[in-house]
Image: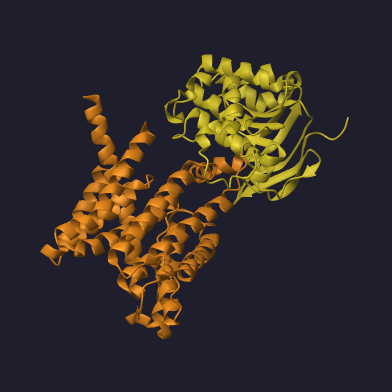
């Protein structure tokens, strides 16, 4: 087998005295759904932000599809096929659901130095955008401003925006954050569907979802990888139970 | 339907403005032609600021700089005997675009309060530069001997001709503004105002788009400056004093940010109030202040928001 789609080696990030990411290494082959779990404050989101290009690591290497991307800004990484979603819903509240997606499509449809034709009636944007809304079951809300969507719908829109950039790798930061059981179940179904065509890095607190979906799990504690392996092996791992799952069982 | 309403409001406003020279001739008050020429020039400046402030979220606190650069372009060329309007307006656009490019390229690397402070600092630098250059009158300003000449096409010696030129440019810029904010480009700068981090994450290099918007806005304001020079036949540093930048911003906020038509109404309201109140009392600002406070506190979307809100209520009733 060739090089993995995403290869991270020795990733380290310090915020003042806090070691947020400590020598993190990951190897994610094409087609895998790789979950990163860990207690609150373990530095999961910081890892995602470094992979997406929002935070520059102090040291370490990130190779995506064979290319060193560590010094590329976020928008260039997006063009290479990396897309992220946010833990705190980060949609354009005053735009409609369809406009949100159309804007993400637009980002990858050539330059935007087009000043005259209204974007709202641009079929080249609206066509693909409608398809994506369909894929995440939001077609019925296409014309509604993002601000008035329900929490579950906003979370789906959040994923849809990442999808609309046509990624090869999806970085999902707690897609089920704040969801009730019904919305969570729907999100698991959506992710299971996406998993067939995409490589996914998933941060999630919902352990049922993680173990239902993941091909491989990495456990992060205080910025360090303490275990990585198949879900069953992780479940059985003593250190992990001690550091993380154990606490859950007690609580 | 919202679009149709905006178009109707714009057309009514422009028709009313077109009727002013006739009305002022009818009532024998030629002064109103000058007043409304001035108002429309500031309306152009305000709408150019709204493009980056209301839609792009770029709080440029130095917009009068471009007004000054446009006016000085006319003044300085005229000083050297170049009175061709195409050259003068060409320089006004080019110079203000260039200065906006330089100021924007540096300021846009910051955001929030720092952006406001840097744009203000640059405008103060250019203000003091204009004060210190004695060749062009320094603090006392520069008299302009004649209006911009456009071959035999347009004769700006006639105040009514100047009035209609300003009205035509205001109309053109409103049309351009409406198209820009709805275009792909417009969606990018609006998206960047709403959530810059998300814009980068979905793949937009937002800096270059914001800078382009900043340059377009500066160039539009430069045209307003060149028109102002033709109205007053005089240019002095006071045209780009920081309080002038503040006035333009007040017009935008008073009229309603992010609507383009709002700032035009804001310019009308501000300058009509200023004119009306200053004829009653020398302390007109003491009256204007509370009015502005009222608008900011109770009508956050400005005059245009009040108008839309009132219509909505009658619609429900």
In the rendered structure, the answer to whether residue B309 lies left or right of residue B63 reads: left
For chain A, what colour was chosen?
A: yellow
Task: Compare residues A189 and B67 and report the one nearer the observer.
Answer: B67
Task: Compare residues B197 and B38 and report the one nearer the observer.
Answer: B38
Task: Compare residues A168 and B173 and report the one nearer the observer.
Answer: B173
In the rendered structure, the answer to whether residue A53 lies left or right of residue B183 reads: right
- Quadrant location of the C terminus of chain B in the rendered image: top left
In the rendered structure, the answer to whether residue A216 lies left or right of residue A92 reads: right
Color scheme of the displayed model:
by chain
Q: Is residue A13 above or below residue B107?
A: above
Give the percent coordinates (x, y) of residue A162. 61, 32
Q: Is residue B136 above or below residue B99?
A: below
Q: Which residue is drawn at 39% across and 45% down?
A: B258
Residue A243 quadrant: top right
Residue B35 quadrant: bottom left
Residue B110 in view, yes or no: yes
Q: Residue at x 26, y 54 (%)?
A: B268
Q: Which residue is drawn at 31% across and 68% down?
A: B231
Which chain is the one coloured orange? B
Residue B288 in view, yes or no: no
């Amino acid at each position: 087998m060739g090089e993995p789609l995403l290869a991270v080696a020795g990733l380290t990030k310090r915020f003042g005295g806090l070691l947020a990411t400590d020598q993190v290494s990951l190897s994610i082959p094409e087609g895998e759904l790789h979950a990163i779990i860990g207690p609150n404050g373990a530095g999961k989101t910081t890892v995602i932000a470094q992979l997406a290009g929002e935070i520059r690591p102090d040291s370490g290497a990130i190779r995506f599809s064979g290319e060193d991307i560590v010094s590329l800004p976020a928008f260039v990484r997006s063009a290479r096929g990396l897309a992220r979603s946010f833990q705190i819903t980060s949609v354009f509240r005053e735009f409609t659901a369809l406009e949100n997606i159309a804007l993400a499509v637009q980002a990858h449809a050539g330059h935007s130095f087009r000043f005259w034709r209204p974007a709202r009636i641009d079929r080249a944007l609206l066509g693909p955008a409608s398809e994506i809304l369909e894929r995440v079951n939001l077609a019925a809300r296409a014309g509604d401003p993002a601000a008035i969507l329900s929490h579950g719908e906003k979370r789906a829109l959040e994923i849809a925006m990442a999808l609309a950039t046509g990624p090869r790798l999806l970085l999902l930061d707690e897609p089920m954050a704040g969801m009730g059981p019904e919305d969570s179940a729907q999100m698991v179904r959506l992710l299971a569907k996406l998993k067939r065509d995409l490589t996914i890095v998933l941060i999630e607190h919902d352990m049922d979802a993680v173990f239902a979906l993941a091909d491989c799990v990495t456990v992060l504690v205080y910025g360090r990888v303490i275990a990585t392996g198949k879900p069953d092996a992780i479940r059985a791992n003593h250190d992990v139970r001690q550091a993380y799952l154990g606490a859950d069982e007690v609580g | 339907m919202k679009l149709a309403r905006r178009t109707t409001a714009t057309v009514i406003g422009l028709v009313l403005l077109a009727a002013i020279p006739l009305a002022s001739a009818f009532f024998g008050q030629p002064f109103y032609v000058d007043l409304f020429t001035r108002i429309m020039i500031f309306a152009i400046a305000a709408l150019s600021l709204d493009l980056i402030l209301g839609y792009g979220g770029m709080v440029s606190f130095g917009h009068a700089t471009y007004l000054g650069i446009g006016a000085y372009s006319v003044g300085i060329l005229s000083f050297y005997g170049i009175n061709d309007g195409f050259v003068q307006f060409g320089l006004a656009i080019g110079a203000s675009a260039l200065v906006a490019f330089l100021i924007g390229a540096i300021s846009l690397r910051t955001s929030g309060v720092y952006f406001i402070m840097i744009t203000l600092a640059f405008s103060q630098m250019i203000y003091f530069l204009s004060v210190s250059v004695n060749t062009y009158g320094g603090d006392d300003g520069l008299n302009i001997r004649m209006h911009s000449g456009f071959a035999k096409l347009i004769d700006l010696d006639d105040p009514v001709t100047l009035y209609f030129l300003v009205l035509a440019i205001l109309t053109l810029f409103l049309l351009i503004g409406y198209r820009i904010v709805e275009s792909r480009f417009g969606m990018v700068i609006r998206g960047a105002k709403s959530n810059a981090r998300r814009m980068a994450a979905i793949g937009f290099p937002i800096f270059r788009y914001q800078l382009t918007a900043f340059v377009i806005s500066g160039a539009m304001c430069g045209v307003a400056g060149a028109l102002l020079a033709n109205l007053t036949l005089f240019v002095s540093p006071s045209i780009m004093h920081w309080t002038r930048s503040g006035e333009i911003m007040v017009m935008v906020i008073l009229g309603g940010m992010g609507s383009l038509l709002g700032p035009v109404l804001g310019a009308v309201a501000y300058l009509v109030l200023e004119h009306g109140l200053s004829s009653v009392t020398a302390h007109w600002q003491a009256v204007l202040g509370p009015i502005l406070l009222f608008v900011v506190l109770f009508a956050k979307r400005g005059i245009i928001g009040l108008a839309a809100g009132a219509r909505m209520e009658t619609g429900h009733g």
